[in-house]
Image (cartoon, grey):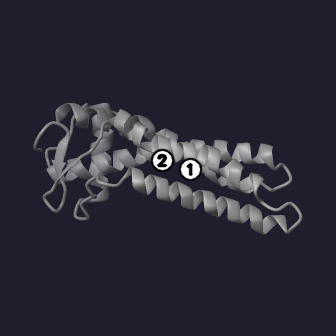
Amino acid sequence: MTTSGTVHDAAGHDAAIPGPRGAVLRALPACVLELVGVPLLAWFVPRETGRDWWALGIIVGALLVMFGAVTLASRGLPRTDPHVDQTRWQNAIVSARTHRSLPSDPAVRVTAARMSYDRILMAMTFPFLVAGIACGALVRPDLSWIPPIGGLLVFTVMGLARLPSAWAYLRLHAVSG
């Protein structure tokens, strides 16, 4: 650790990992794109052509927009250390919530902080994508919207279930930095 809230990434550069509120603020542009973009795409789909391919194109387009916006939200953050085992950073995230403690290894700290940040992004973006698809269904009820919403609901529930641990880890990480 260097200054408050700043960590060294694998290359030795200073990189700040935002706290949970900072993660939410960084995710907001992606959420707005998802909520507004899907209904706009649905509005411009031609009504007289084969609808199944257009619906698939809308969903793929929305996912690409979401991926691009989330990638931009994660820009400038340290990368996860490939040498840190998955169970170590997962245990660190759980330990932050249950025992209110952070690991002593800086590589595990950075990896767990980055994964917590990604979990908060997932918990933010997937509900907005589902809401955007629901708004798209209101704009164009003639398109088939049930399959994409069903699949995304699974990811939404997973993201929301992981949110409390990720939030606790980033809050503790920001305070300890």
- Name the mark on residue 122: 2
Determine whether 159 is above or below 67 in the image.
above
Left or right: 175 as drawn, with respect to 66: left
Numbered disc 2: secondary structure: helix
User: How many circles with numbers are drawn on the protein?
Assistant: 2
Where residue 173 appears, as percent x and y from the top left, is: 24, 37
Where residue 60 appears, as percent x and y from the top left, is: 63, 63
Where residue 89 appears, as percent x and y from the top left, is: 28, 50
Left or right: 115 as drawn, with respect to 16: right
Tell me, yes or no, if residue 149 can be seen here.
no
Where residue 66 appears, as percent x and y from the top left, is: 53, 54
Numbered disc 1: secondary structure: helix
Going by the numbered disc 1, the residue's amino acid type is: Phe
Quarter of the image with the C terminus in it: top left
Label 1 sits on residue? 155
Residue in the picture at 44% in, 38% down: 163
Mark 2 or mark 1, earlier in chain: 2
Which of labels 2 and 1 is toward the front? Answer: 2
Separation of disc 2 and disc 1 at Cα?
Answer: 8 Å
- Callout 2 touching callout 1 (CB < 8 Å): yes
Packing grade of label 1 (10 A; few <14, some 14-19, many >=20) is: some
